[in-house]
Each structure stands twice: as C-alpha cells, then as structure tokens.
Image (spheres, grey):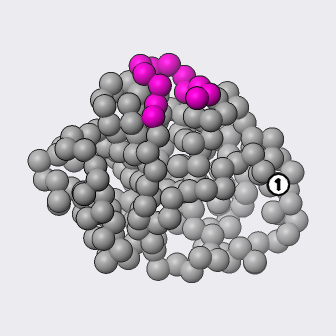
C-alpha cells in the first residue's frame, strides 16, 4: 500500500511562531494551488483521512471539490498536529531556554509546554498507520501536518517500538506546506518495521 503524506497549505502565521495544535486557517490561494497539484498526481481512487484542524480540512475540501466522485475523507484526530501546550502561538525565541533544554534532555517523554510528548504522538500515529494498513487499499492519503509526517516516517524507518533517545534521531525533513511525500506500507495489519 502506498500512503501519501500530504501537508496542509501555508498559514498566515510567521515561521518563527510555534504552531502545533493551534487551529490556524491556511491561505485560501495556497490551498487551491496545492489541491490542483494533488489532483494532477493522485491515482483515480484512494482511501483518505484528514486531520480535524481547519488548515488540513481546507485542503481536503478543495481536493474533494476537484474529485466529487470520491467519498468524503474520514476525519481522524490522530492526524492532528503535535500539541505544544503553553508554547502554542509563542515565538520560538520567547520560549525559555531552560524549557527547551528540558525537552531536549528527555526528548521522547517530556511534554513541551505541558502539551504532548513525542511518545504520545508516535503512539497515535502508529494506531493510524495500523488502520491504514488494515484497509487493504492500494493507495491511502493523509492530509495532515509536519509532525505527524515525521512520526510516520520515523516509525517506518526505526520500527514499531522505537523511541528517539534524542532530537538528533528525529526526522528533520518534512514536506513543505502544500507538498507531500509517498511511502510504502507493509501489507496487512503487521507492525510497521524497518525497510
């Protein structure tokens, strides 16, 4: 099964602002352009899921308008962006260095800003991966966020039980806003494993 990991279009927030679970809308023109590019490359049929955050739903709605014969995407809270708690909406430079260091010191289990841990993010993304594999479709599409895409890629490379010991083990690369990557999932409902 191929899984298309699609990142929503850009928002109006500055790039130096922490925007995880913040429900910021995407730029309408960038969303329409991303939907057109996706429409041109996606296969005729696929199973798809969308994050509940508005910026992802906007892209799903724009794509669905171009593919009205498709069933509507399934909303899945497991595809929501990482929750940075009290850091949400703050400039990264305004987050106290001691708090950033505490997260780096226990990267997998610390809860930045009192929000979500990387371990919790991985757990919910792994559940979503299992559900995608269980559909037995040839193609699946997630319209989601950079953090979720990184968590999926980490799982597929490092294995089902792996937790990053440090931030250096976490994938740096993610598609730009309005872009995507495509990965191959193992067949059936088996645990994602090392390629």
Residue 111 in view, yes or no: yes
- Name the dominant secondary structure of the magenta segment: loop
Give the residues drawn in magenta, as a range: 184-195
Left or right: where 114 falls relative to 29: right
Quadrant location, the N terminus: top left
Q: Classify mark 1: residues with Cα within 10 Å, few (<14), some (14-19) or many (20+).
A: some
Residue 95 in the image: x percent, y percent?
76, 72
Q: Residue at x 28, y 38 (%)?
A: 47
From the viewer's perspective, is residue 72 above or below residue 25? above
Left or right: where 39 falls relative to 168: left
Left or right: where 53 falls relative to 22: left
Q: Quadrant of residue 48?
A: top left
Q: Residue at x 80, y 55 (%)?
A: 103
Q: Quadrant of residue 43?
A: top left
Q: Nearer the viewer, residue 22 or 128?
A: 128
**Does the magenta-highlighted stretch encompass residue 153?**
no
**Does the magenta-highlighted stretch encompass residue 186?**
yes
Which residue in the protein does label 1 denote?
104
Tell me the element at label 1. Answer: helix
From the viewer's perspective, is residue 33 above or below residue 69? below
Quadrant location, the C terminus: top right
Left or right: where 169 falls relative to 1: right
Q: Residue at x 28, y 70 (%)?
A: 32
Residue 159 in the image: x percent, y percent?
64, 29
From the viewer's perspective, is residue 179 above or below residue 181? below
Residue 143 in the image: x percent, y percent?
39, 52
Residue 18 in the image: x percent, y percent?
63, 70
From the viewer's perspective, is residue 123 above or below residue 14? above
């Amino acid at each position: 099964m191929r899984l298309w990991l699609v990142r929503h279009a850009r928002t109006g927030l500055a790039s130096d602002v922490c925007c995880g679970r913040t429900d910021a809308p995407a730029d309408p023109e960038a969303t329409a352009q991303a939907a057109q590019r996706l429409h041109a490359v996606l296969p005729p049929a696929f199973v798809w899921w969308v994050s509940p955050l508005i910026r992802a739903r906007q892209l799903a709605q724009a794509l669905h308008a171009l593919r009205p014969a498709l069933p509507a995407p399934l909303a899945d809270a497991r595809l929501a962006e990482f929750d940075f708690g009290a850091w949400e909406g703050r400039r990264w430079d305004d987050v106290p260095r001691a708090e950033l260091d505490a997260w780096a010191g226990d990267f997998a289990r610390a809860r930045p800003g009192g929000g979500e841990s990387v371990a919790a993010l991985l757990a919910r993304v792994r559940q979503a991966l299992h559900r995608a594999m269980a559909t037995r479709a040839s193609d699946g599409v997630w319209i989601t966020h950079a953090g979720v895409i990184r968590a999926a890629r980490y799982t597929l490379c490092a294995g089902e039980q792996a937790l990053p010991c440090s931030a250096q083990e976490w994938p740096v690369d993610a598609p730009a806003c309005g872009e995507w990557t495509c990965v191959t999932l193992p067949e059936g409902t088996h645990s994602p494993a090392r390629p």
